[in-house]
Image (tube, coloured by chain):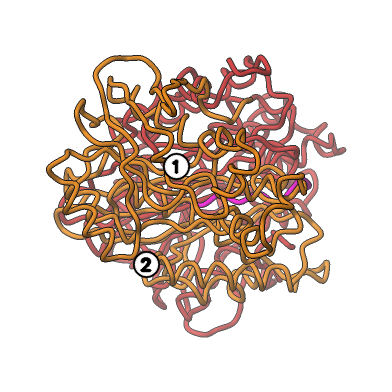
Chain colours: A red, B orange
C-alpha cells in the first residue's frame, strides 16, 4: 500500500491483472511483453478506446465494460481473418475507484479473455481526474498475405452479414424507455439491451473469412455507414434489399410497432457483426462454415460498379443513407 | 464536416494522421494494421498512457506532448533490446480541441516518428468530457529469444546507466520556481526543463544492449525505485556509489546549491535513460558501442547477492531509499 493508503500500481497489477496474463505477458513484471508470431504469419493490430458516458454508462456492470472493451477489438481481428494472439490494456482510473469495482472489472476481463482466446500481454494503469477511460490494443495473426481487407470488394460479389442487425442501437434507445418499448416482452427488451452491452465478436468465423470472403469489416458504426466506407475503399457501390437485412424477433417487433425504427437499425452502431463480400461461388462453403460455428450468414445484396453511395431498396423505393462515421468531433 | 460543423473522425484521420502512416498502416483506411515481423524475430509490445495534468500540463506544447507519448514507449522498446517497428495511438480528445492544436500535435508526432524510426500503424480517436488522454502502444522486434529482461541480473555484474540522472525531476520541480533555481543560469534551467518535456529514447543502443547487457529496463519511475524493482525481479541486490551517479552540470549545480536535491535526482521519475547490468567482461565493448552512437555509459555500482533493497553509499554513509512505484492509486 502506498503512503496514501491506496495500493501502488505494482500491487494493483499483481493482484488484479497478473493472474490473467498469457505466457508472453511475462507475469506483467517486465516493461514490455514478448510475442512470438507463428512462422510465415503476419500480425494484425487494432486499438479501440472507450470512455465513460461516451461508450458506456457509469451504471453498467464493470464486467460488461471490460468484456465490451476486449470484444470490440477481437471483433476487428475477426473481420480481418485474424486469430487472436493477445491484448494490451491501458486503463485511466478516476480517483474514486473501489476495490470491488476493479475486482469485478478484472473478473469480467479474465472471462472474456478466456472466451475469446486472447490472453493479456501487458498494460498501463494511470490516474485521471476525468472519466474512466480504457484503451485496448489487440494483436492477431494470419498466414502471410491473408489479412482480409476493406479494399477488395469486387462488382458481382454478394454482400453478406452475420447475425442480426440493429439490436444494439435499439437496445441503447430502450434505455430512454420510449413508447414503442411497451410492445416488447421483457425477454425481447432484455435481448436488445444485452446486445448493446455484450458484443459477441465473431472470431469463430475468422478462418472461413480469409478463405472465402472478398472484403470484410466489422460493423461498429452502423450497416449503412460501414457498407458505404467499404464500397468506397474498394472503388465500387452496392445494392441492398432492405427486407433481406436480418432482424432479430425483438428488432422485427420494434420495427413493426414503429416502422421508422428500421432506419435506426440500419444506421445505428455497435452491431459487431461481420460485413463481408463473397464471390458467389464461395457462398455455400462460407455458409456451411458459419453454420458449423453456430452463426447465421445472410445475403443482403450485391456489389455493383460505380462510385455512388450504396442503395437500400424496399417495396420499389430506393434510398441512400447519408451517413458516414457517426463520431463527430 | 459533420452535422455539428466539426470534422468527422474519418476526415480528422485523413487530414492529420494518414500522412504519417507506415506501410503497415494501410493508409489508416482499414480497421486494423498489418505488421510482418522479420523471420526469426520476436515482437516486443509496450503501452503507456498519458493524462493531462498527471503526465503533462495543459500549457505544454502539443508537439512536445506527442513526442513524449511516443518517446516513453520507444524508450521501453530500447531497454528491451528491440528495434521499433511501429505504434498505435489512442487519443481521447476533449470537446474544446482546436485545429491548430491538433495540427501541432500531429506535426510533433510525425517528427518524433521519423526521429525514432517508428511509423504510425493505426489508432482510434474518441471524444471525452475529461482531460486529454493519450495511449500509445509501441511494437518492436528482436531476434528470437533475445529480448533483454528485468530478471537476468546476476551477482557480480556491473550496474550501469546511460546519460545523466535526475534532470527531468529537477526540471519539473523548476516549474514551481524554487529558491535554488536562482543559482542556475538560464541555459541550465532550460536544460532541465527540456529533459522533462522531451525524453530522448535511447533506441540507438538497442542492438548493443541485447548483445552485451545482462538485464535492462528504462528509467521512468526513478533510479532508486526502478533499480529496486529490477534487483527484486532478478532475486539479487545492488551496491551503488552515489557519487558515481552521473549528473548533468545543471543538476550538479542544483545539488551543490541544495544538497537534499540529490535524493530527488535519484528517486524522481522521467529520466528515460537505460538502467542495465553488464558482465564485467562486456563493459568495454558496450561502452564503445555507446560512444559510437553518442551516448555516455556510467558504471554506478555492482549487483550483489541477497534480497535487501539496493544500498546507495556516499562518504561512508549508506542509505536505502524506501520507494517503489511512485504511482499510487
Does residue B90 show up? yes
Q: Residue B320, image x and y in percent?
A: 46, 20
In this picture, residue A12 sits left or right of residue A19:
right
Tag 1 and tag 2 share a subunit: yes
Chain identifier of the residue bearing label 1 in the image: B
Camera-near label (1 vs 2) is 1
Which of the 4 image quarters holds residue A90?
top right
State the residue at coordinates (42%, 38%): B243
- The residue that label 1 is drawn on is B219
In this picture, residue B40 sits left or right of residue B322:
left
Can you say whether A57 is above or below B126 in the image?
above
Q: Residue B259, image x and y in percent?
A: 60, 36
**Few, some or many residues within 10 Å of mark 2 (<14, 14–19, 20+):** many
- The residue that label 2 is drawn on is B24
Nearer to me, B219 or B255: B255
State the residue at coordinates (42%, 36%): A122
Q: Residue B162, image x and y in percent?
A: 37, 50
Nearer to me, B100 or B323: B323
| Highlighted magenta segment, given as a residue range | B128-137
In this picture, residue B248 sits left or right of residue A252:
left
| Mark sitting earlier along the chain (1/2) | 2
Amino acid at each position: 500500500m502506498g503512503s496514501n493508503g491506496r495500493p501502488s500500481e505494482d500491487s494493483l497489477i499483481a493482484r488484479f491483472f497478473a493472474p490473467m496474463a498469457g505466457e508472453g505477458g511475462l507475469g506483467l513484471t517486465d516493461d514490455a511483453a514478448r510475442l512470438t508470431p507463428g512462422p510465415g504469419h503476419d500480425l494484425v493490430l487494432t486499438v479501440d478506446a472507450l470512455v465513460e458516458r461516451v461508450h458506456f454508462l457509469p451504471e453498467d456492470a464493470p464486467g460488461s465494460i471490460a468484456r465490451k472493451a476486449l470484444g470490440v477489438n477481437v471483433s476487428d481481428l475477426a473481420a480481418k481473418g485474424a486469430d487472436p494472439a493477445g491484448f494490451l490494456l491501458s486503463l485511466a482510473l478516476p480517483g474514486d475507484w473501489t476495490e470491488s469495482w476493479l475486482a469485478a472489472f478484472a473478473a469480467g476481463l479474465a472471462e472474456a479473455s478466456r472466451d475469446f482466446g486472447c490472453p493479456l500481454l501487458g498494460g498501463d494503469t494511470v490516474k485521471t481526474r476525468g472519466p474512466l477511460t480504457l484503451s485496448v490494443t489487440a494483436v492477431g495473426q494470419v498466414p502471410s498475405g491473408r489479412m482480409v481487407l476493406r479494399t477488395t470488394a469486387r462488382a458481382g460479389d454478394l454482400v453478406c452479414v452475420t447475425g442480426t442487425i440493429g439490436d444494439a442501437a435499439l437496445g441503447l434507445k430502450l434505455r430512454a424507455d420510449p413508447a414503442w418499448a411497451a410492445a416488447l416482452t421483457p425477454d425481447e427488451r432484455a435481448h436488445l439491451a444485452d446486445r448493446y452491452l455484450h458484443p459477441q465478436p465473431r472470431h469463430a468465423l475468422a478462418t472461413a473469412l480469409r478463405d472465402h470472403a472478398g472484403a470484410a469489416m466489422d460493423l461498429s458504426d452502423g450497416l449503412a455507414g460501414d457498407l458505404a466506407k467499404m464500397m468506397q475503399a474498394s472503388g465500387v457501390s452496392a445494392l441492398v434489399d432492405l427486407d433481406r437485412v436480418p432482424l432479430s424477433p425483438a428488432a422485427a417487433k420494434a420495427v413493426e410497432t414503429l416502422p421508422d425504427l428500421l432506419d435506426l437499425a440500419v444506421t445505428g452502431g455497435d452491431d459487431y457483426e461481420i460485413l463481408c463480400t463473397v464471390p458467389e461461388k464461395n457462398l455455400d462453403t462460407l455458409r456451411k462454415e458459419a453454420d458449423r460455428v453456430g452463426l447465421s450468414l445472410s445475403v443482403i445484396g450485391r456489389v455493383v460498379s460505380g462510385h455512388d453511395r450504396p442503395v437500400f431498396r424496399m417495396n420499389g423505393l430506393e434510398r441512400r443513407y447519408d451517413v458516414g462515421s457517426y463520431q463527430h468531433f
